[in-house]
């Protein structure tokens, strides 16, 4: 839904974000300079890049929550401080990153967030090189082509015990009503359960990640994050990227609701086989859809009272 943004909000956004953008450019340059050193001192480079990432992400989180007044509600399982984990989440909008990072910040893992990103970013000077230096998995979603890239990322976590939240949006794309209908048709044709309020998850990446990181003694759990939004009574209505950076009073004046629900599953409790891991993720998505539906109804009751 397109929303009118007054000119003064655009001006305010530029004033707030310009220093952060300039710092982001500097951070990308610093990360790129670290890249050649990763061959000789991988752990030192990882630690240094994590400190740089922490400063970048903490700053943008400050803009979203403090400057622009986004109130993020949380629920679910407590997450241990400093614990490395595999993270899966549904994907609605750009602001999903803020939701995940809010939990990471509270868990002392903000600098160690590593997201699966598109392989095309490798060709982007400084930004792509910086992501590479940080240990971000840059993938094409073709798991045969991505094998060497995944081996690079997984080896750092397994062999060097890099602390990490390795994060993937398992639906591989953002939720829209059109994509939901496509997912529903595919699930019916393939005899798969269609989760409510979600797209059917892609399982291959999750299975590959779990099977590799089982060998990392410090990776203790899988976190399942469910992200929910509402604005003026419209469920799954999230702010645009620019609104998150420019618009004041997101949770008051603009009436956005933000909620993230966390579930923690010990890694050793997950099934062993690829097939059963795929079914495990499928079951989580059905449960996530039911949780979203119940939260949608709860918000509706609150709005009408």
Image (cartoon, rainbow, N blue to C red):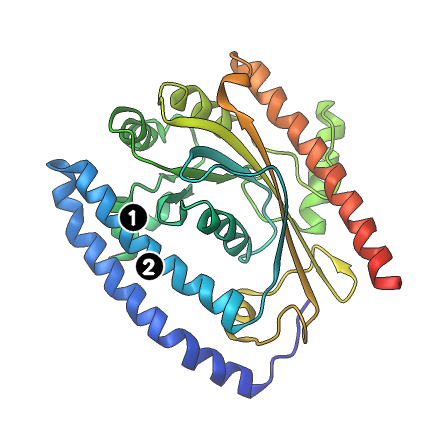
| Tag 2 residue | 55
Picture coordinates of residue 105, whole percent (x, y)? 45, 51
Observer-nearest of 209 and 71: 71
- Eyeballing the image, is 138 above or below 215? below
- Eyeballing the image, is 131 above or below 71? above
Place residue 232 in its image quadrant.
bottom right
Q: Secondary structure at mark 2?
A: helix
Residue shown at the point (36%, 47%) measured from the top left: 120
Picture coordinates of residue 73, whole percent (x, y)? 64, 54
Residue shown at the point (60%, 43%) measured from the top left: 90
Q: Secondary structure at mark 1?
A: helix
- Eyeballing the image, is 78 above or below 94? above
- All told, the count of numbered labels is 2
Q: Is residue 291 left or right of residue 119?
A: right
| Tag 1 residue | 50
Picture coordinates of residue 193, whole percent (x, y)? 74, 28
């Amino acid at each position: 839904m397109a929303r009118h943004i007054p000119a003064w909000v655009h001006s305010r956004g530029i004033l707030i974000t310009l220093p952060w953008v300039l710092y982001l450019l500097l951070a990308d340059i610093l990360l790129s300079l670290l890249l050649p050193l990763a061959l000789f001192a991988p752990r030192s480079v990882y630690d240094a890049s994590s400190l740089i990432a922490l400063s970048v992400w903490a700053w943008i989180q400050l803009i979203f929550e403090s400057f622009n007044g986004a109130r993020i509600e949380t629920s679910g399982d407590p997450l241990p401080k400093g614990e490395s984990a595999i993270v899966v989440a549904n994907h609605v909008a750009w602001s999903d990153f803020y939701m995940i990072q809010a939990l990471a910040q509270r868990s002392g893992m903000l600098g160690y967030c590593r997201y699966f990103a598109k392989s095309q970013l490798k060709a982007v000077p400084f930004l792509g090189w910086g992501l590479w230096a940080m240990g971000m998995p840059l993938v094409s979603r073709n798991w045969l082509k991505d094998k060497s890239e995944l081996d690079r990322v997984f080896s750092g976590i397994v062999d060097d015990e890099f602390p990490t939240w390795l994060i993937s949006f398992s639906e591989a794309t953002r939720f829209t009503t059109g994509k939901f209908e496509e997912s529903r048709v595919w699930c019916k044709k393939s005899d798969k359960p269609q989760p409510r309020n979600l797209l059917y998850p892609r399982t291959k990446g999750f299975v590959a990640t779990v099977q590799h990181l089982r060998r990392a003694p410090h990776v203790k759990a899988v976190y399942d994050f469910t992200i929910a939004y509402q604005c003026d009574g419209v469920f799954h209505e999230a702010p645009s990227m620019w609104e998150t950076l420019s618009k004041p009073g997101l949770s008051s004046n603009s009436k956005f609701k933000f909620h993230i629900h966390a579930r923690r599953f010990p890694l050793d409790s997950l099934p062993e086989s690829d097939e059963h891991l795929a079914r495990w993720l499928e079951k989580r998505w059905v449960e996530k859809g039911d949780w979203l539906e119940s939260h949608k109804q709860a918000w509706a009751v609150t709005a009408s009272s």
